[in-house]
Amino acid sequence: MDVTLSHIDKNNYQAVCQLELAKYQEELVVSNTWSLIESFYHENTQARALCLDGKPVGFIMWEIGSDSVVILRRIMVDYAHQRHGIGRRAIDLLLAEMANLPAVKKLQVEYPRSNRTAKAFFSALGFELEEEKSESDILSASMTIEK
């Protein structure tokens, strides 16, 4: 299983935009089409296709912040390819890429408190929940990027 983070271009953007989530997940993640548009207009934001053996099966988007933090804005894997380690491998690849940027020290993610799947996924990868604000519906978790 060869998972890669590939640049999105005229040859693969349609395949990335056509990836699908399970119906119950659609309200939890912004569409890849909208995310791609955001990536073009938000400074320091990058988007990649998650490819399995060269074929797009997912999407990841992050922003390099000004305070040595990379913020994971989106990660999704097509419903037909979920639960096969692709998301985990994508995070590993992102961490490896960020380890080459000297100023970057931390990877952070935010997700709705109600999204138990996200909480379990990121916790299993070693993300530590940051201080919870009881009134907030959004949780934040982070991990140190090993150099």
Image (tube, grey):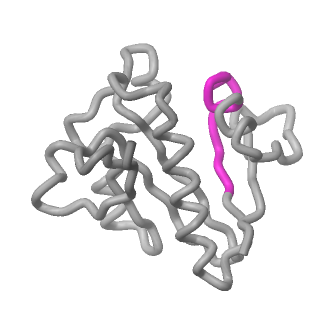
Across and down, in percent, residue 9 comes to 18, 63
Q: Is residue 20 shown above or below 13?
A: above
**How many marks can you see?**
0
Q: 1 and 26: which one is in front?
A: 1
What quarter of the picture does the C terminus occupy? bottom right
Is-magenta flag for residue 117?
Answer: yes
Residue drawn where x is 75% and y is 37% of the image:
123
Q: Is residue 119 shown above or below 1?
A: above
Q: Quadrant of residue 69?
A: bottom right
Q: Quadrant of residue 70?
A: bottom right
Residue drawn where x is 20% and y is 35% of the image:
18
Is-magenta flag for residue 111?
Answer: yes
- Residue range highlighted in magenta: 108-119
Across and down, in percent, residue 72 comes to 56, 54
- Horizontal relation, residue 50 to residue 85: left or right: left
What quarter of the picture does the N terminus occupy? top left
- Horizontal relation, residue 73 to residue 2: left or right: right
Q: Residue furthest bottom?
A: 102
Q: Residue furthest top?
A: 24
- Horizontal relation, residue 109 to residue 27: left or right: right
Q: Residue furthest left?
A: 11
Residue drawn where x is 81% and y is 46% of the image:
128
Q: 33 and 41: which one is in front?
A: 33
Across and down, in percent, residue 92 comes to 58, 54
Residue drawn where x is 86% and y is 40% of the image:
132
Q: Is residue 110 shown above or below 106?
A: above
Q: Quadrant of residue 114?
A: top right
